Image (cartoon, grey):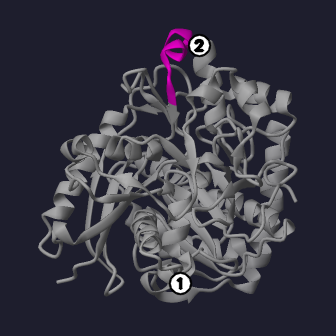
Amino acid sequence: MSLTLTLGLDVGTQGTKGVVLDLHTSAVVARAARSYDLLPPAQPGAAEQHPEQWLDAAREVVGELLAHPDVTPSALVALAVSGQQHGLVVLDEHDAVIRPAKLWCDTSTARQAAALSERLGRAVPTGFTASKIAWLAEREPEHWARTRRVLLPHDYLNFVLTGRACMEAGDASGTGCFDPVTRRFEARAVDAVDPRLAECLPELVAPGVLIGEVSAAGAARLGVPAGLPVATGSGDNMMSAFGSGATQPGVAVVSLGTSGTLFAQSAAPVLDPAGLIAPFCDATGAWLPLLCVMNCTGVLEEVRAAFPGSSHDALSEAAAQVAPGSDGLLMLPYLQGERVPDLPHARGALLGLRPGLLRADRLYRAAMEGVSLNLALGAARLRALDVPVNSVRVVGGAARNALWLQILADCLDAPVQRLAEAESAALGAALCAAWSWRRAQGDELSAHELATPCVQLTGEPVRPDVQRVALYAQLRDEFASRTEQLFGLTPSAV
C-alpha cells in the first residue's frame, strides 16, 4: 500500500467531489461525492448557497475517502481544494458567515455589473464577484457594514482548514478587480466596487506553494487529519485544466456541466478587447484564456423534463437518428440569461418551427446543437486571439454522451476525446497538492511533468466530418445572426 497519497476536493455548484491520488502509481485510488441544491431564490435571478452546505458535504466526502480500504490516512502528505469560481463569501469580525454566498450563475447583479463596466471602461461580467460586492453594498448595506473578509468559495474552505485567509491569482482573476498581467488587485477597480473593499481582501499567494496545515479546528470541522499540509488550490476551471492536462499550450478543454467552458493554457496573457474571453491566470504561473456560457447541461435537462418518463440515454439515442441541423430547428439556449454573450436578462428561443418538429428527438438534438454552437463561437474567438484549438479534451458529467461528442467535434472542427478520470477538477486539486508538496521538498519539477502520467485519455478520438463541419459553420453564422436580431448583440463574434 502506498505511503504517499494526496487528497483533492472540488466544491461545486451541484455537489462536492473528492479523490485520493497515489503518487507512486499515478492512479486515483478512491472517489466520493455528495450533492446539494441551490437555496430558493430570494429575488429574481438570485443563485445562492450557504457555505455550511459545502462544509457538511466536504466532511462526508472526506469521511468516505478516508474509510476506503485503499486509503491509509497516515499516508496523506497534502490536500488542495478546487472551488466554483466567482462566488462571494463574506465574514464578520468573528469570521462568521454573514449571509448565503452569491454564486457565479447569479444574475441579480446585472445592473451593478453594467455600472462597473461603464465606470472602468471594460467589461465586468455579471457573474464575476465584483458586481456581487457592489450589489451587497447597495442592497444590503447592513451586511456590508459588518463585512471584514471577502473570500471566494475555495478560499473559504482553505480558511476553515488552516485559519489562513489568502487567495491565488487563478481564482482571483475571476473577481473582476484583478489585473491578470501584473497578478495584483487593480486599485482603481477595487475602489470602483467600494472604497472599503481593499481592507477586506485577503493576501495573495504564489502558485505551487503550501499555505499552511490543517488546524485542530479544521480537523474537527472537516474530518481531515490535523497537521496535514494544504496547498493553494484554485478555482474549478484552473483545477480542471491541471486535471485534464492543459498544463502547457496546445491542449484545449471543454467542460460540459452546469456551465459550459472552453479554455486552453497560454504562456502569455490573452486580453480580449471585446471582453468575451476571460483573461484568467491558471494555477501554475501561466494563463488560462477561457470562455464560459451559463447554459449547458441544464438545457438538455429542461427538454428531458418536458417528456415525463424519458431518460437522457433514450433521448440521445433518438436524437442520433435526426439529421444534423435538427430538420431546421434552431435553439438559442439562453434559458437563464447568458454570460457570453453578455445577456443576463435574455430568454431562450426556438426558431424554425413547423409541423412535426415539436418532438423529443428534434428538441433534444436542437438543445445539444444550440449549446455547442455557442461554444463554437467561443472557439472561433479564441482562434482569432491566436489561441490554438487543434484538439479538445472533454470533461464534465455529459462527456460520456457519444452524440454530443460528435456534435462538438463537428462544431469545433477539431477531434475531441474523453478523459479516463471524469472528475478533472478534483484530480487537479490532488495534483496541485502533490506539486506543491514536491516543491516544498525541493523538487522543482514542472506542473506539466507531474500531471502528464496521471492524466489518461480513454477511447478513440471523435473526429470531425468534413460535410458536417461545413453545415455547422453555416448554422454558427445563423446562430450569431439570430442572436443579434433578437437581442441586439452578437455572441463571441470574430
Specify the quadrant of the image occupied by residue 175. top right
Residue 377 located within the stretch drawn in magenta? no
Residue 197: x and y in percent read 63, 26
**Residue at x 46%, y 88% (from the top left corner):** 459
- In front of the other: 396 or 453: 453
Examine the rendering and report whether any part of residue 321 can be seen.
Answer: no
Residue identifier under label 2: 139
The single residue placed furthest to the front in the displayed view is 442
Foreground: disc 1 or disc 2? 1
Q: Report the disc number at residue 286.
A: none
**Region in magenta:** 140-149
Residue identifier under label 1: 449
Image-based side of 392 in relation to 156, left or right: right
Three-letter code for the amino acid on which mark 2 is drawn = Arg
- In front of the other: 104 or 119: 119
Three-letter code for the amino acid on which mark 1 is drawn = Glu
- In front of the other: 26 or 275: 26
Residue 147 located within the stretch drawn in magenta? yes
